[in-house]
Image: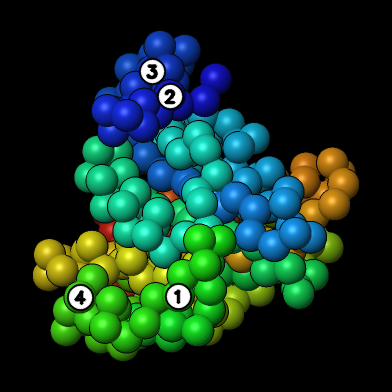
Amino acid sequence: MAQIYDHSNIRIATRAKEEHGSFDTVTTVLVTGYGPFLQEHEDNSSWRIASTLPSILPATRDHPIPIRIVVYPWPIRVSYQAVLDLVPSLVEKVNPDIILHIGLASGRNFYAIEHGAHKSIYGTHIDVDGQGFPQERSDEAFGDLPSILETGFDVHDLYRRWKAEIPDANADIRTSPDAGNFLCGFIYYTSMSLFAKMKRAERPVMFFHVPYLSTEEQVDEGREVTKGLIRALDESRARRGTHHGNVGAGSRNT
């Protein structure tokens, strides 16, 4: 069973503990997916994957710590204001160890993890509410933060671990320099800015782009690729850390 999220009260209740027992140690991963944004993408592949993830990836011999997956149970509206209203409160209440945002890259036929995101390139890119996010709004929301924020994950280490976790060796997975100039980049920057504003060295946020998936078989593959990425995020965080600039290290042996 999935996590329950009461949006009106911004409250998380976890059924996973009831089903699997109380964990002394567990990694909590917050996952989001997007809703429709163009007429041809009323069925967003990011949400098809996110909404069907399991609530728990159990411990195994290779992965001794279970992973609790908390999926925000509605597709996020493709709206700058919706992201600004939701993400800070969601992160505060869930208090995840890792944040994974998933979005659709309809022009790609591969999966990609993104290095970073821009602060203020969203002014002319109109959301489903007919709004852009001009420079003055960016300055108001993010202040004097850098023009680009990068994830705290060691992306090259993460990619290596991700590749090893995917059962289908033919799955096309890649890295990419940034999450683009629309809501994918915006939500990524917004989440990373929460850590940057607190002057925290750790920045355990990742954005994951998926291609358009038209069949159930493709969605099944996408789900397995995503589960492999979540395992890899946990391992990379534990062994390499998620500090900006990736200085420092995690607690498990390399």
Q: Locate residue 197, reporting x and y percent.
A: 15, 69
Tell me the residue that label 1 is attached to. Answer: 132
Tell me the residue that label 2 is attached to. Answer: 4
105 in relation to 52, above or below: below
159 sits left or right of 89 in the view: right
Task: Give SS at disc 4.
Answer: helix
The numbered mark, 1 or 4, whose residue comes first in the sequence reads: 1
Q: Residue at x 73, y 68 (%)?
A: 106
Q: Amino acid at mark 1?
A: Gly
Report crowding for label 4: few under 14, some 14 to 19, many 20 or more residues within 10 A (C-alpha).
few
The residue mark sitting in front, 1 or 3, is: 1
Q: CA distance from mark 2 to mark 1?
A: 32 Å
Tell me the residue that label 4 is attached to. Answer: 140
Q: CA distance from mark 4 to mark 2?
A: 33 Å
Q: Splitting the image into 4 quarters, where does residue 64 fall?
A: top left
Quadrant (top left/top right/bottom left/bottom right) for the N terminus: top right
Q: Amino acid at mark 4?
A: Glu
Q: CA distance from mark 4 to mark 3?
A: 40 Å
Q: CA distance from mark 1 to mark 4?
A: 14 Å
The residue mark sitting in front, 4 or 3, is: 4
State yes or no: discs 4 and 2 in contact (Cβ < 8 Å). no
Q: CA distance from mark 1 to mark 3?
A: 41 Å
Report crowding for label 1: few under 14, some 14 to 19, many 20 or more residues within 10 A (C-alpha).
some
The numbered mark, 2 or 3, whose residue comes first in the sequence reads: 2
Residue 172 shows in the view = yes
Q: Amino acid at mark 3?
A: Lys
Tell me the residue that label 3 is attached to. Answer: 17
